Amino acid sequence: MEQIISRCGNICSECPWSMFVRKKIAKEDWEEYSQQIKTYTGYKPVKFEWEGCVGCHTPNDELPSHPFFNFLKKCRTRKCGQYNEIPNCAYCGRFPCANTVASDKFTKEKVSEKLGKEVSDEEYERYIKMFDSMTNLNDIRSRLKDTQIKNPKLVTHKREIPELMGTFKNASFKFVYDVLLAIANSNLGIKGIDTVSGLELYKEREEFFWRFLWLIGIFGNVNKHELNLDSGTLYDNRKPISLPNNEEGWNIIFDILSKFGIDTELEIKTDKLYTPGGYMRAKIPKTNEPAYLLKMKTDPKLQKYPFFKGLNEMLLELQKNSEKRAFSNFKKLNFTSILE
């Protein structure tokens, strides 16, 4: 069949999660095949419980109703490609940008290094190449003419922050508010926020950050300029956000926090941190103990007042005065209920 390339450069027609491959491989051969995929990528395709992915070029109104397809509807690279009317990222004037979901994690060299052995060309073609999205996109780009490349249509976004109609009852609250305001006015470490993919990533990260800061303020164990928060508490109270599923994901968050004076590190509590599917555990298997701990401390510029203590007291008071609207008001920086 004709090769089908996804918006982000994966080869859909060879992807084990796709309906295309499921039609080619007999059910009796599936277990061996899926185990091979897991060996090379760390992820094992789900069993024959439904027809498989129909690909990201399928319009929303033609996607099956199965919950699996929510990831396609939400994919920022798919939205960006649709908005700019291009087949995939290789056709974009800003390629490669930092906001695509295309990855360079599955190159032949990186998989060989991870496995501790040289991956053959045959192994790469059969089990890896379909996920080597950045390499695939670079290959497409090298064959395009200048006239085929389009600059993205730009988008704008302005965060609406309510004016303070009053004063905080103490300087500590105002100090905390100023830090939160700086975070709200930032791009949260995202470049290219003027594209659909950049804006979608910003919205996703913004939603995460305000829930995360809320969890820190409400549930963190504070000791002067330091705060600890365990993964079990994070997991149990995370909704409606998803937590980073690996250490690399957390490091992105830590780098952003450091720009605002909050230094964070992970303390791993188990040698079984990851599930067989490659995701970080919240708790140690067969126990209720946390799998990791977030250890946070403020640098000198945030030590004029005890920042974590001020955040905790501020949020508890907001929770008391705003009740069910407390978190909603917090992420909008609406502190009217606790102003004098």
Image (cartoon, rainbow, N blue to C red):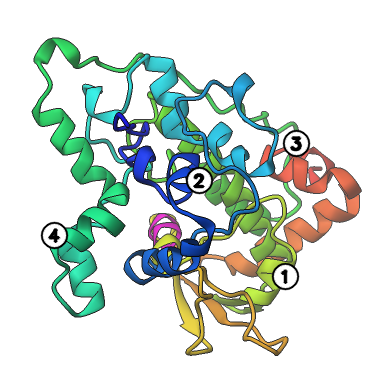
Are the residues at dot 2 and dot 4 in contact (C-beta closer than 8 Å)?
no
**Mark 4 residue element:** helix
Are the residues at dot 1 and dot 3 in contact (C-beta closer than 8 Å)?
no
**Mark 3 residue element:** loop
Q: Which amino acid does label 1 sit on?
A: Phe
- Numbered label attached to residue 121: 4
Task: Tell me which numbered mark, 2 or 4, is placed earlier along the sequence.
Answer: 4
| Inter-mark Cα distance, 1 to 3 | 28 Å
Task: Tell me which numbered mark, 1 or 2, is placed earlier along the sequence.
Answer: 2
Left or right position of 43 against 149: right
Query: Residue 193, percent across and down?
Result: 39, 30
Task: Tell me which numbered mark, 3 or 2, is placed earlier along the sequence.
Answer: 3
- Numbered label attached to residue 46: none
Are the residues at dot 3 and dot 2 in contact (C-beta closer than 8 Å)?
no
Task: Tell me which numbered mark, 3 or 4, is placed earlier along the sequence.
Answer: 4
Which residue is disc 3 drawn over? 166
Q: Which amino acid does label 3 sit on?
A: Gly
Which residue is disc 1 drawn over? 219
Residue at x 67%, y 72% (from the top left corner)? 220
Task: Tell me which numbered mark, 1 or 3, is placed earlier along the sequence.
Answer: 3
Residue 209, compared with residue 276, is above or below; it is above
| Inter-mark Cα distance, 1 to 2 | 20 Å
Residue at x 53%, y 75% (from the top left corner)? 275
**Mark 1 residue element:** helix
